[in-house]
Structure formats: structure tokens, C-alpha cells
Image: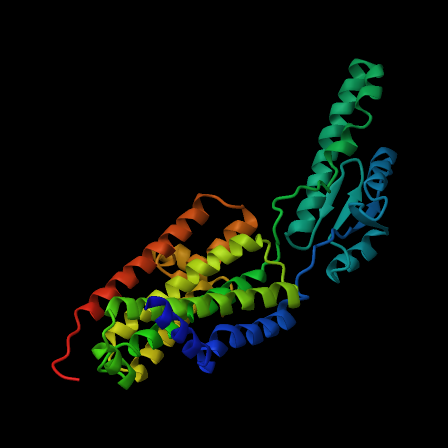
Amino acid sequence: MFLHILKYELKVALKGKAVIFWLFGFPAILGTFFYIAFGNLYSEEQFEKIPVALVTVTEDRNFEQTLESVSEGEDGLFEIKKTDKKKAEKLLEDGKVSGIIFEDEEISLTVKSEGIKPTIIRFFLDQYKVNSEMISQQIRENPLNIFRISDMMRSEIDPLIKQERSDGNQDPYVQYFYNLIAMSCLFGALGGVTGVLRSQANTSALGARRCVAPVSKFASMTASLAAQGAISFTCNTAAMLYLKFVLGVKFGVPIGMMVLIILAGSLNGLAVGYFVGAVCRSENMSIPIVVGVMMFFCFMSGLMIGNMRAKVEMTAPWFNHLNPAALISDSFYVLNIYGSNERFISNILILTGLTMVFMSAGALITGRKKYAAL
């Protein structure tokens, strides 16, 4: 009997065009707009040479050779502009150079403001002074030491050291797609609401007929929720596949793990909808409540404002551990940046725990309902 009910529940669920739209159509459309808006904003940053003005007061050939050596090639550190003091100050004022190096008996630096580029210039000069003094001391002690330390300065001040921090996607805008999938999963609550309302005698004529049918209420409700959950999971997975393979969004997460997160998120959305539908008495009340609550969760997770979840983490970290949208999006983020670890497992366990709580509460409420007459 369960399979019979499940088959017809699936047929009915597939005819629910509104639910299908919110589970697949809307995420696909919004994801397309996200891709158009964010798709080309991020690219792998290329190091650009730092423009520097060089003003020579007293010539120091060793310093100039060192400066030229670290500025050679496309991946050089500096773009040197040799000029006089007046022109150099004009270039600095106009923002065309990041600093002015004065080559004198004591090498000095003038900058307009602090920042990354002036800091790199200052670091280079400090390193040069330290290495220059060390080399001079070594040569004074033993002239043959020049062969041992001739390459020391170049190796220490090399500004470009490639180091992979993660195998995932470093694009900061990918978090919007994580939150989009989280929203799609939580919209499965609409199916949960629909399923429970169609099984209660006081909310629909179909529910009244089901209550007098010679079928276990548990079997009927389980089949209804299973059908809605299957539709939700399928639509959410299809939306993810559209984003990944059609739009080409690089999630940085193995597809198998993405399916696992979507499964956990879809079940959570279904459970919340089941609970809300059991508490409320009509569809007109349940749907607005579900949509409002889910959109609030998605907003606090960062769907509209990218760093919202980080702000919540600073002020109320406990809320992120109870917000299903934050748990779903953070699961994607953790797998992308760190790979599977304790934080990811914790997110999935909390999400599963919340699902069980809402499912149990919904079952308790619907199981206790009795009707004086139908």
C-alpha cells in the first residue's frame, strides 16, 4: 500500500508547477543572473610591477645593479623610472609611482601613503641594507667569501613565491552560488507544507478522505513526504548540475559531496515545511510563513550580502549553527577551501539533527490530531 500511495503522490507532486518552479526554475534563473553579474569579476590575480621613481644623488653602482636585477622580466618586482627630484615628486603626487627611492650615501624612501606597494618597497630596501652590510663584513673578514654569498641577496628578496593554499576555487563570489543552492534546498519546505496539509481532514477535502480510508496515517504521511522529498532532491540536484555544467560555475567541491549536501539540505527543508504545516491550519498561513522564514535564513547566510554570515559569526556565532542555510553554504565553503574535515562533519550532523527534531515535532503534532466529525 505504501508503494501504491507513493506512486500517486509522485504523480501529483510532478503536477505541482509552482513547487517545481521554486525548486528548479527560480534557482536556475537567479543563478544565470548571478553568473552574468559575477562571472567575470574574479580572475586569478597577476602580480604587476611596482612603479618606482629613482633619484640619484650619489651613485651606488651595486645598489643599481641589484635594483635592475630584481626588475628584469615580466615578473620583475619594480618598474624603475630614473628622474630628478622635482619630477619624481610630481609623479608621486599624481599617483604614477608608489614611492621615490633616493640613491645617496644613505638610501632612503619617500611615499605618499601607506599600503601594500610602499611596504614591499620598504621591505626590499631594508633587506638590501642588511645584506649589503653582511656582505661587506664577510668580505672584510675573508675576500673569498664573495663567491659563497654572491647570490644571497637575490634569493632572499624574490617577491614571487608560488604557494598553493587550496585546490578549490578561490573566487569569493562563488559563495553566492553556495547560498543559492541552500535557498533551493530550503524551498523544499513548500513540498513539506503541501504534503501535510493534504493529509489533514481540517485543511482539505482530500485530507478528509484520507482520514477515513482504511490506510495507516503513518504510511500515508510517510509516502507523501517521501514523494515531496524525492521531487525536492531531484530538482535541487538538477539546478546544481545546470549551474555546474551549463553555466560552468566552479564550485571547487567534488560532485558526490555536493549531492550529499543537497540531500541533507533538501531533507531539512522538507522537515521544516512539515513542522510548519502541522502547526498552521491553512495553506494561506503556512506558505507565507515558510517563505518568510527561509528567506530570512538565506539573508543571514549571505545570499543578498556576501559577508553577512561572517558578521553574524562575530556577533552571534550560535545563530550560524542553527541556521540551515548557513550550515549548507558553509559545508560547500569548507570542502572548497579545506577539504573534508571536522567542521564539515559538524555542519552535516547539526543539519541532520535539526531535520530529526522538526520531523519528530511534526509527527507528534499530526499524530495527536483527532476529529470529532468529518
- Residue 108 spot, x, y in % from top left: 73, 42
**Residue 247 appears in the picture as rendered:** no
Depth check, front residue: 197 or 224 = 224
Direction top: furthest residue: 142
**Residue 21 appears in the picture as rendered:** yes
Depth check, front residue: 211 or 365 = 211
Residue drawn where x is 78% and y is 24% of the image = 135
Does residue 354 sit above or below 221 in this rendering? above
Residue drawn where x is 26% and y is 78% of the image = 210
Does residue 278 sit above or below 307 in this rendering? below
Residue drawn where x is 84% and y is 15% of the image = 144
Say left or right for 187 vs 70: left
- Residue 134 spot, x, y in % from top left: 74, 24
- Residue 171 spot, x, y in % from top left: 62, 58
Check the picture and name the quadrant holding the C terminus: bottom left
- Residue 42 spot, x, y in % from top left: 66, 61
Depth check, front residue: 185 or 322 = 185
Direction left: furthest residue: 372
Say left or right for 335 vs 141: left
Check the picture and name the quadrant holding the N terminus: bottom left
